[in-house]
Image: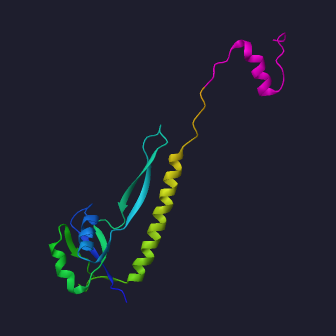
């Protein structure tokens, strides 16, 4: 049986991944879930970029044994372990985290495919060719299949 996951709170926004990497350096599994969102750079350009937004702002999920909870105090930007109304740490089963992680990864992959499809843009336009007045009847015949009558105006 795998160890349950706990919801770890951080001091401020944007520090989730730093705390998660410190917990991973201690030898435990930690995950800061994020959502990928695409945005267009400008209206005039067909270029899309993406950003990662945390699903749990100021939070991450970590599988840490209860005996090691005191070691978390040494981590910079660590705030607390989320507790319920009975002041017991909130335990989340590992199989629930696995299912949640798989769904988040699938969602992010679909969003990245959508963003990258938008970056392909339109095919490049062909450059205009100058047309000589003398070659106009031949071009009209090629385009429309009928020769241009020079006498009819």
Residue 110: give x, y in percent of width and height: 51, 61
What is the quadrant of the N terminus in the image?
bottom left
**Is residue 147 located in the magenta-colored stretch of the structure?**
yes
Residue 140: give x, y in percent of width and height: 77, 22
* Residue at screen point 82% across, 18% down: 148
Query: In the displayed structure, does residue 74 sit left or right of residue 20?
Result: left
**Is residue 144 located in the magenta-colored stretch of the structure?**
yes
User: Which coloring applies here?
Assistant: rainbow
Q: Nearer the viewer, residue 139 or 44?
A: 139
Residue extent of the magenta highlight: 128-153
Q: Of all residues shown, which one is farthest toward the top?
A: 151
Examine the image and state in which quarter residue 88 appears: bottom left
* Residue at screen point 18% across, 71% down: 75
Query: In the displayed structure, does residue 41 sit left or right of residue 87?
Result: right
* Residue at screen point 61% across, 31% down: 126
Q: Nearer the viewer, residue 94 or 57?
A: 94
Examine the image and state in which quarter residue 124 appears: top right
Residue 94: give x, y in percent of width and height: 38, 82
Residue 122: give x, y in percent of width and height: 57, 41
What is the quadrant of the C terminus in the image?
top right
């Amino acid at each position: 049986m795998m160890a349950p996951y706990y919801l770890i709170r951080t001091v401020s926004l944007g520090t989730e991944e730093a705390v998660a990497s410190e917990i991973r350096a201690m030898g435990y599994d930690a995950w800061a879930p994020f959502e990928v969102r695409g945005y267009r750079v400008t209206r005039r350009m067909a270029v899309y970029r993406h950003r990662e937004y945390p699903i749990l702002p100021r939070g991450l999920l970590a599988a840490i044994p209860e005996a090691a909870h005191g070691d978390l105090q040494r981590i910079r930007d660590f705030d607390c372990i989320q507790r319920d109304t009975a002041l017991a740490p909130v335990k989340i089963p590992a199989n629930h985290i696995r299912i949640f992680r798989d769904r988040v990864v699938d969602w992010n992959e679909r969003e990245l495919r959508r963003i990258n499809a938008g970056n392909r843009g339109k095919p490049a336009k062909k450059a205009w060719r100058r047309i000589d007045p003398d070659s106009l009847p031949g071009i009209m015949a090629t385009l429309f299949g009928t020769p241009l009558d020079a006498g009819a105006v």
